[in-house]
Amino acid sequence: MPATATTSRSVLRQAISGQRRRVTLASVLAAGHQGGEALVPVIIGVVIDQAVDGGSAGTLVFWLAVLAVVFAGLSYSYRFAARAAEGASLRAAHDLRVAISRRVLHPGGGAENGKLAGELVNIGTSDAQRVGAVNAAMPFGIAALAGVLVSAVALLRISLPLGLLVLLGTPPLLYLAHLIGKPLERRSEAEQERSAHASGVATDLVSGLRVLKGIGAEPAAVARYRDTSQNSLKATLRAARAKAWHDGAVLALTGIFIAIVALVGGNLASSGTISVGDLVAAVGLAQFLLTPFLIFAWVNGQLAQGRASASRVADLLTTPVAVATGAGELPSPSLGNVRLTEVSYGSLRGVDLDIPAGQLIGVVAADPAAATDLLDCLGRAGDPAGGRVHVDGVDLSTVDPERVREVVLVAAHDADLFEGTLAENVGTDPDEALAASAADEVAAALPDGTATAVTERGRSLSGGQRQRVALARALASDAPVLVVHDPTTAVDTVTEAKIATGLARLRQGRTTILVTTSPALLAVTDRVVVLDGGRVTGEGGHAELARDRADYRAAVLS
């Protein structure tokens, strides 16, 4: 499904149209099933009038055979209708998950703004499933309508008043059911939003569990999740009450309607207007009508929940990208010249910075937000509000973000590892990168070396081990421009010094930007740039700055 859907209605429409053949097949088969169900009491009425009252054994056997054929058709049509409908539901949900995943992973970003990771997962799973379920509900809604029409035609044959009662009474009943479903739709949307938020909070808490334990923040975290979970529970209970009220109200309306049909049929039979067989058929049809009306209630509930989820999916798919694609081209191979001119972005204020190709520089930012904003600009996670970022003379805001990231690799401080072996996390030819990042020591300590399996997000490793493997992965990419943010905060000083030496050796002749306050790393740089108040306030060698500037000493040596 393309990411051009703008409303919940268009999302639902595309989910159905994408599975049109399966939905059509399921609708035809299900309609045949419901039509056959409606014919059963009619056939029984014929048996009573023609075979039982007439006393003909041959006629009785014939109509019983007809009844058996109808039941066989009912069985197979329902089975294959259910299979086609469920297949359409699952495939539509799958297509939605793919579209949602593409939007979340779009190189332009933006989908994550204002949403927790768990919330995005909830939209891609629960909401996608609810939208897909509309494909399973629609065929049976159409089938229920077919059953009502067949019943109405049969009742018209028996009695004009009975047939007209069903034909004219059904539309108002369906409209009332639609109105009754409105509160359910609103509360289902609120339920999904609260549930998604609770999932997001839970995901964040689990991913940060070690940190929470380390700083003794478990009680605050538990209290936060308890409040979020209780809000989600309240929304779920409100939605459950709305669904119970909806189902009960629709069932009550249906029961009243069927009672009226049975009452009219009984009066007609008592006055001799219809035969005994016709009365049996009319009563059987009245009882049968309970099934399609219950289906209507179920379908209406599914549509209400599907519309609520489709609204959340549409909001995600139509979220504007943070950075647009462009027609600009970076040279290949890239030299690695980087130039920032009067860049203003977030906490950055008019930053001027010139980094010749092949230079290893350090950037010390007194404000952590400035460091993050600098990384966003260099990796084109965001475009500057003012000024320009050039690589090899090309304005990055004109280049497709995927191409930018092939040339400029930003290794964030909190980069995660993937599930797989250590070697698979680092990439091809990992030996030099492992040695430069001291991750070879990590491999040596593991039972199967680089073939050791790493769990999701690298949770099977310690914080320092994860940092070293993540740095090895960044170094193994051999990017023309490598930007690394605080890669040694979780390692000891001896290991840090080893990493500094290895990094400088491996990246010799390649442009490297170290955003850090580590003295060991800064000591191996060609020069250091100081950011304070969002501006460049000084630059020079590490030893020189440490000697002459108190603010630099406070940031680096404290």
Image (cartoon, helix red, strand yellow):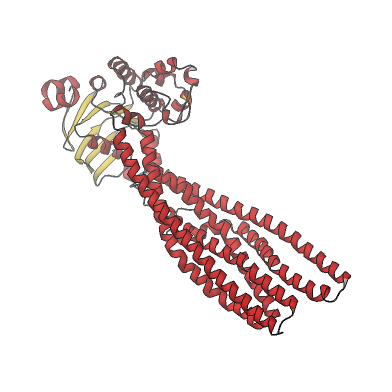
**To which quarter of the image does residue 215 belong?**
top left
Between 322 and 111, the one lying in front of the other is 111
- Given the current orientation, which residue lies at the most extreme front position? 270
| Image position of 348 with respect to 465: above or below | below
| Image position of 366 with respect to 385: above or below | above
- Asked if one can make out residue 145 in the rendered structure from this viewpoint, the answer is yes
| Image position of 175 with respect to 132: above or below | below
- Asked if one can make out residue 326 in the rendered structure from this viewpoint, the answer is no
Residue at 46% over, 62% down: 245
Residue 196: image location, x then y, percent: 40, 47
Between 292 and 549, the one lying in front of the other is 292
Name the image quarter holding the C terminus: top left
Residue at 63% over, 71% down: 148
Residue 493: image location, x then y, percent: 27, 16
Residue 120: image location, x then y, percent: 41, 45
Residue 286: image location, x then y, percent: 64, 71
Between 66 and 211, the one lying in front of the other is 66
Q: Is residue 39 left or right of residue 373?
A: right
Q: Is residue 515 left or right of residue 166?
A: left
**To which quarter of the image does residue 36 belong?**
bottom right
Residue at 48% over, 67% down: 178
Number of residue marks? 0
